[in-house]
Amino acid sequence: MQKVFSKVAMIGVAMVLAAPVQAELVLSQAWLRAVPPVSPTMAGYVTVTNTGPDAVAVTGAHTAIAGHVMLHDMSMQEDGTRRMRHLGKVEIPAGASVSFAPGGMHLMLMHLSRVPAAGESVQVCLEQADGEPVCGDFPVSGSAPSEP
Ligand SMILES: [Cu+2]
C-alpha cells in the first residue's frame, strides 16, 4: 500500500514540473506621444519589467488603431541626424527592466486608422516569443508621465 501512495505522489510532482513557467512581463510608464490628427504614425513608450525566472524576448506589438507596430531604436549619427532602426526583438533579461523612452527604443505605430487625441488611452499589446501578449493602457500625452 505504501508503494501506491508514493507513486501517486510522484505523479503529482511531475505534473507540477511540467506546467509551463509563465514569464511575467509588467508594463509601467506607458504612454503615446500626442501627434497632429493628420500624422500617419505615432511613437509609444513603456518600461518593461521581467519578473519571471527566464529572459523574455519581445518580438513586436499590436494595437487596434495601427495597421502595423514596429520596434524601433533611434540613435544619433555623427553628423547629428537621428536614425531609426528596426529591431526584430528586444530581450528582457530575468529580473531586469528595459525602457522604451524618447531618444532611444520606441514602439512605432504605423498606418494609423485613427489618431487618438491627448487625454485618450489606447490599449497596446506587446508580443512575446513564447507566451501570450501582454497588454497595457497607453495614455496619449505631450510628455512622459511623471514617475509614480
Ligand atoms: Cu521609429
Image (cartoon, grey):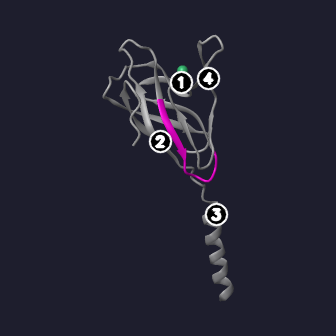
Q: As drawn, is 111 to the left or to the right of 19?
A: left
Instruction: Give me the disc on residue 103.
Output: 1
Tell me the mark number nearer the camera, choosing from 3 and 1: 1
Report x, y in % for residue 62. Answer: 49, 30
Does residue 23 lie above or below 29 as drawn? below
Per the rendering, the mark at residue 17 is 3
**Mark 4 vs mark 2, CA separation in Å:** 21 Å
The label number, if any, that marks residue 27 in the structure image: 2
- Judged from the image, the secondary structure of the residue bearing numbered disc 4 is strand
Which mark's residue is nearer the viewer, 3 or 2? 2
Task: Point out the image quarter for the N terminus.
Answer: bottom right
Q: How crowded is mark 1: few (under 14 residues within 10 Å), some or many (20 or more)?
A: few
SS under mark 3: helix
Start and end of the magenta stretch?
45-55
What is the three-letter code of the residue carrying label 3? Leu
Q: Does residue 134 appear left or right of residue 137 in this picture?
A: right
Q: Distance between the Cα atoms at labels 1 and 2?
A: 19 Å
For marks 3 and 2, the one nearer the N-term is 3
Q: Please report contact status of discs 1 and 2: CB closer than 8 Å, yes or no.
A: no
